[in-house]
Amino acid sequence: MRTSFRLTIACCTTSSSHARGCAGIEDRAIFPALAARMDVSGLQQDHKEMETVIHDIREACRTHGELGGHLAELRELVFPHMLLEEEQTRAAKLRAAGFTPQEMHNMG
């Protein structure tokens, strides 16, 4: 196996693990707190879709399959998702939803 291919597989596997970890933290700790006062269903749906694509990436890594399409699909999901998360969690928006400064601090 060529070194560059092994490196690509290692990077994809590691990156997908990090993405899953971040999404898991948000799903368990952040989204439930936000969902009490605002609609986060779009963010939660994004995570479900990303999990499917990450699974496909990890499977392609395991079987030495095609990665390009999966990586492009993940990129198309992640960047808009991150922008939406940033918009949804701006301090002004959280204050408008009734979160106190302490509650906002506890989420971070």
Image (cartoon, grey):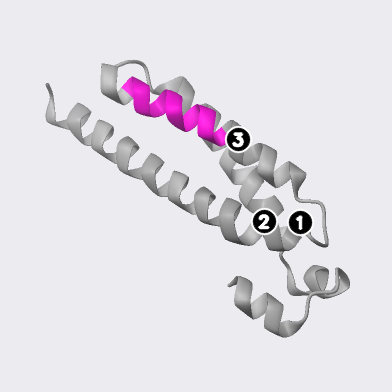
3D distance between C-alphas at marks 3 and 1: 16 Å
Residue at 26% from the left image edge and 31% from the top image edge: 9
Give the class, few, some or many, for how many residues have Cα within 10 Å of label 3's Cα (few <14, many ≥20). Answer: few
Pointer 2: what residue? 31
* Horizontal side, residue 2 vs residue 83: left or right: left
Q: Quadrant of the C terminus?
A: bottom right
Nearest to the observer: residue 70 or residue 106: 106
Q: What residue type is labelled 1?
A: Ala
Q: Earlier in the sequence, mark 2 or mark 3?
A: 2
Q: Which amino acid does label 2 sit on?
A: Phe
Indicate the position of residue 53 as horizontal and vertical percent values. 50, 28
3D distance between C-alphas at marks 1 and 2: 6 Å
Majority secondary structure in the magenta region: helix
Q: Is mark 2 on a helix, strand or loop?
A: helix
In the image, residue 36 sits, relative to residue 12, either above or below, namely: below
- What label does residue 48 carry, if any? 3
Indicate the position of residue 105 as horizontal and vertical percent values. 63, 79
Range of the magenta residues?
50-60
Are circles 1 and 2 on residues that touch, CB within 8 Å? yes
Q: Which amino acid does label 3 sit on?
A: Lys
* Horizontal side, residue 40 vs residue 9: left or right: right
Residue at 73% from the left image edge and 68% from the top image edge: 90
Give the class, few, some or many, for how many residues have Cα within 10 Å of label 2's Cα (few <14, many ≥20). Answer: some
Indicate the position of residue 69 as horizontal and vertical percent values. 47, 21
- What label does residue 35 carry, if any? 1
In the image, residue 74 sits, relative to residue 59, either above or below, namely: below
Q: Quadrant of the N terminus?
A: top left
Are circles 2 and 3 on residues that touch, CB within 8 Å? no
